[in-house]
Amino acid sequence: MVRSLKAAGHRLAVVTAKNEPHAQRIVAHLPFGDCFEDVIGATPCGTRSHKPELVAEALGRLSLQPADCWMIGDRRMDIEGARHHGMRNIGVLWGFGGRQELEAAGVHALAAAPEDIPLLLQA
């Protein structure tokens, strides 16, 4: 799914509350890690650690407007971070959060499987 999104012309980045240097190492070892333009994470000192701050950092680094982006995540913090910036979002049901958590956070759409994502991005 990640490779197909990249091939379709989507710009991809990871936005995580994990420590940025650590997250960069993790993504670099993924078989599809090269598909991500950037990995934005928490600063080691903790000055940037909440999802709205992390999303803002990603938008700035990638020179993007929130209306042109989607957040795809599995936890309420992902959805809340996206909503804080007025971004569309997709909650995935195979992660750590669940339907109830994502719906309570105000998710725009839910994906039951990775192959659902490209169709939801067209909506």
Image: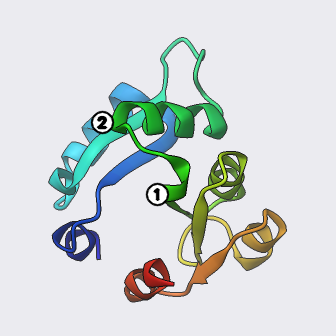
- At mark 2, the secondary structure is helix
How would you rate the neighbour count of disc 1 (Cα within 10 Å): few for under 14, some for 14-19, many for 20 or more?
A: few
Q: Amino acid at mark 2?
A: Gln
Give above or below for 77 relative to 5: above
Number of the label disc, if any, that sits on residue 25: none
Residue found at x 59% / y 65%: 89
Q: CA distance from mark 2 to mark 1?
A: 24 Å
> x and y percent of residue 56 in the render?
55, 34
Q: How many marks?
A: 2
Question: Picture coordinates of residue 5 (x, y %)?
Answer: 27, 72
For the view shown, which residue lies furthest in the right direction?
Answer: 104
Horizontal side, residue 101 vs residue 63: left or right = right
Left or right side of 119 for 99:
right
Q: Is residue 42 above or below residue 97?
A: above
Amino acid at the residue labelled 1: Asp
Is label 2 in contact with label 1 (beta carbons under 8 Å)?
no
- Looking at the image, tell me whether mark 2 or mark 1 is earlier in sequence order: 2
Res 53 quadrant in image: top right
Tell me if residue 20 comes above or below residue 23 in the rendering.
above
Q: Image point 67% across, 58% down: which residue?
A: 79
User: How many C-alpha atoms fall within 10 Å of the one at disc 2: few (<14), some, or many (≥20)?
Assistant: some
Check the picture and name the quadrant holding the N terminus: bottom left
Q: Quadrant of residue 54?
A: top right
Q: Is residue 67 left or right of residue 12?
A: right
Q: Which residue is mark 1?
A: 68
Residue 96 placement, left or right of 69: right
Please say if 78 is above or below 15: below
On the image, the x and y values in percent for residue 20 come to 40, 29
Location of mark 2 (residue):
24
Asked whether residue 69 appears in the rendered view, the answer is no
Q: Nearer the viewer, mark 2 or mark 1?
A: 1
Q: Nearer the viewer, residue 83 or 43?
A: 83
